[in-house]
Amino acid sequence: MRFSPGIYEHAAALIGRTPREVSRDATLLADAHAAAWARYRHPLVVAGIDVYNLEPEAYGAVVDTPMGNEVPSITTRPCAEIENLADLTPLKPLAHARIRGVLAAGKALVDRCRGAEVRIPVCGPFALGMGLVGLDALLMATVEDPNALNAALEHLLAGQVNYLRAIHAAGLRPIFFESGTCPPLLPAQSFARIEAPLLKRLFAVSHELFREAPPCVIGGDAALIAKHLFETGPGWVIAPSETDQTAFMETAQAYPEIHVRVNLPATLLLENNPRALEAGARRAVDLARRHPNTSVGCGVVPFETRPETILHLQTIVES
């Protein structure tokens, strides 16, 4: 069984830099993730730190300078209302230095992490909308005016398609991030009505460009939307630690072609409790064996995690 940890800000720790420093420097971004891969040889290398901020910032969102080793977050959003999303000019990715830097880092990582699957982070439509107008506005719109919300998010797809084309032109491949788009934040019926059709269209474009079904990270209580998620056409998903993973894996049985990564809680990596770590790993491996196409991973590895803890967990999973 392969172990596939979620390495983002933890990569910065391995080169003695803050997440913000690494997120804004293509050379540091490549150095950090190359250092992480040299240490862990994890199968999936994502060229990113604050993966949900990149496109919103390109549209005008302000990303803060956090204290210490915190991950940067958005402090000012460019849109006040859902309707404002439709007024945005579709993203022109190569006009933005941070996006160009991520693509440059991705190219470097392909050369430096031979054998790894290097991916460029891309926001799903709901995640992008959240970065541009905020979660509260999106959730209110799902109740008060779902048609307006659907139209606004659909408008954002054109810019994301532009981004996918830029990734393709660079000889790289995407991974979609859309956590927050399922229960307990977004009701299951709203996911099915609004989000799933948009994801399906975005994944279809990705499949046409890259000749593969794309990976997609959706956290939360994903068991409640599992069938709808699988039917959007991803090539790879996670079974989040915060959901009913047994129910999620039962739904996955009907989709043997889709890879499922069974996640442990990332908090286990900070508890310094070897027994709990081993028990969690064994449980995840047992669940993963219920599906023919799986790996075991964890949520986002905290910045301060000891490398020895990750290597110990890897040994348990892969033994």
Image: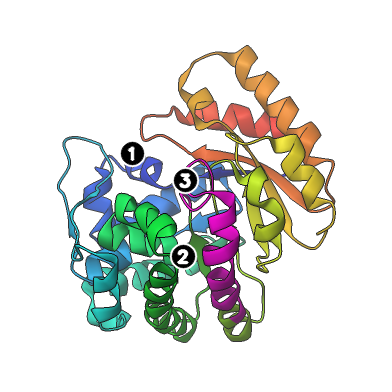
Label 1: state its secondary structure. helix
Name above or below for residue 225 compared with residue 230: above
Foreground mark, 3 or 2?
Answer: 2
Residue 7, which numbered label? 3
Q: Residue at x 50, y 68 (%)?
A: 110
- Along the viewing direction, whichever of 31 and 151 lies nearer the viewer: 151
Q: Quadrant of residue 265?
A: top right
Estimate the spatial distance between the alpha carbons at disc 1 and disc 2, rounded to whole Å: 27 Å
Q: Position of residue 190 (x, y in %)?
A: 53, 57
Label 3: state its secondary structure. loop
Question: Could you tell me if residue 303 is visible in this image?
Answer: yes
Q: Position of residue 289 (x, y in %)?
A: 83, 40
In the rendered structure, the answer to whether residue 201 lies left or right of residue 25 reads right
Q: Count numbered badges in the picture.
A: 3
Amino acid type of the residue tagged 3 in the rendering: Ile
Label 2: state its secondary structure. loop
Q: Position of residue 165 (x, y in %)?
A: 45, 85
Amino acid type of the residue tagged 2 in the rendering: Gly
Whichever of labels 3 and 2 marks the residue nearer the N terminus, that label is 3
Foreground mark, 1 or 2?
Answer: 2
- Along the viewing direction, whichever of 306 and 122 lies nearer the viewer: 122
Residue range (magenta): 179-204
Q: Residue at x 58, y 48 (%)?
A: 42
Residue 156 is one of the magenta-drawn residues: no
Query: Which residue does the numbered mark 2 point to in the structure image?
Result: 124
In the rendered structure, the answer to whether residue 265 lies left or right of residue 53 reads right
Whichever of labels 1 and 2 marks the residue nearer the N terminus, that label is 1
Q: Quadrant of the C terminus?
A: top right
Q: Quadrant of the N terminus?
A: top right
Query: Which residue does the numbered mark 1 point to in the structure image?
Result: 13
